[in-house]
Image: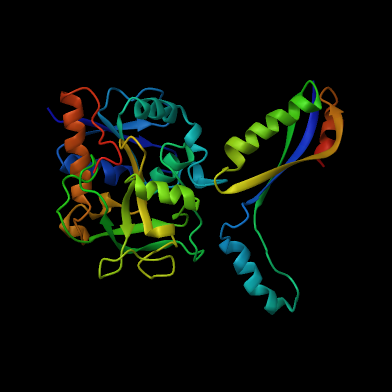
Amino acid sequence: MPVRIGVVVFPGSNCDRDTVHALALAGAEPVALWHEQATLEGVAAVVLPGGFAYGDYVRAGVIARFSPVMRAVSAFAADGGLVLGICNGFQVLAEAGLVPGALLRNASLRFAGQEVAIAAERLDTPFTHALARSGLLRMPVAHGEGRFYADEATLDALERDGQVLFRYVSPAGDPAGPDDPGNPNGSLRAIAGVMNAAGNVAGLMPHPERASEAILGSDDGFAIIRSLVESAARAATEPGPTAVAAGSR
Amino acid sequence: MTSFRFAVNVTPKPGILDPAGRAVEGGLGHLGLDGIHDVRIGRRAELTVDAVDEATARGIVERLASELLSNPLIEVFAVERLGAASSATSPAAVTAGEG
């Protein structure tokens, strides 16, 4: 039986169908979860998709954070449930305090809609275990507020504890500094994605679901979707902690 | 209950890059203005709270400001009292207070 994975639909979400499509390709049964519902219908994992939830007014993600479904997602995450936030979903997770840091206006002040190269820092997490050992992952970004920010002490702690999941990289594979063209938004320490300390909640600005089939120009993102689906399937059959604790690499 | 009018001013924390502020600084030369620096762009919300007294109203505003209008990781806020308290039972007075 395919594993059921929830995709939250906020008013203003616009990558929910792409995410549903990619999850189904990876063998899951996607379940759309409306923002006003207070239960997650027993899904084994949740994806917060890209878009502009509630118009992104005030700050991207902040109003979505107070929706009934997010109370359920927070409780699910606290219980060790797998949650992945993509783009706007990452912004919602950051505003909710479910992952560290904040996503600020792009340093360029321009909306960044382009292909980027990222590299996974860890291949032993529920979100990355299906990734090939080496190499860059090409996938699009599409955001105006994606500049990862945390204070220096927090950045040091994230690196020390293995909570940096993805970085923007140059064609040579080196982390792309804030002024490097490979860093689309000026993210500090080139951070494109992070995890919580427990390792069961992750967010990233690039869009793996938009790079999940060769016909889209890249299927580099599909291994991230497949990692989540496989991890969720394991969680569904073996109840108990599924997360890889950060820092255990 | 009495109506209290407040403003909440939110600005980027000191030290955080504010690209909008930089863009404004970059435009100053075209305006022919000199001597302006350290521009920080924030946002302002004005609102009316019905509460038993001003301290209670201010507490409500501070909760809104800290939990929604600002993100403590990246922003600071200041609550500002606007106008005089007006009775909620007098719509005219409330309207005047909102003007």
Residue A81 at x, y percent in the picture: 30, 29
Q: Foreground: A156 or A163?
A: A156
Residue at left 67%, top 44%? B77
Residue at left 17%, top 50%? A131
Q: Foreground: A44 or A136?
A: A136
Q: Quadrant of residue A186?
A: bottom left
Q: Foreground: B63 or A159?
A: A159
Q: Quadrant of residue A177?
A: bottom left
Q: Quadrant of residue B57?
A: top right
Is A172 located above or below residue A241 in the figure? below
Quadrant of the rendering where the C terminus of chain A is positioned = top left
Q: From the viewer's perspective, tell me whether residue A102 is left or right of residue B34.
A: left
Q: From the viewer's perspective, tell me whether residue A144 is left or right of residue A83.
A: right
Residue A26 at x, y percent in the picture: 16, 42
Colouring scheme, one of rainbow, by chain, secondary structure, one colour: rainbow
Residue at left 78%, top 27%? B55
Residue A236 at x, y percent in the picture: 19, 26
Q: Quick check: can you spot residue A85?
A: no
Q: Quick check: can you spot residue A67?
A: yes
Q: From the viewer's perspective, tell me whether residue A27 is left or right of residue A174.
A: left
Quadrant of the rendering where the N terminus of chain A is positioned = top left
Most distant residue in the left direction:
A1
Is A125 located above or below residue A186 in the figure? above
Mark count: 0
Residue A13 at x, y percent in the picture: 40, 43
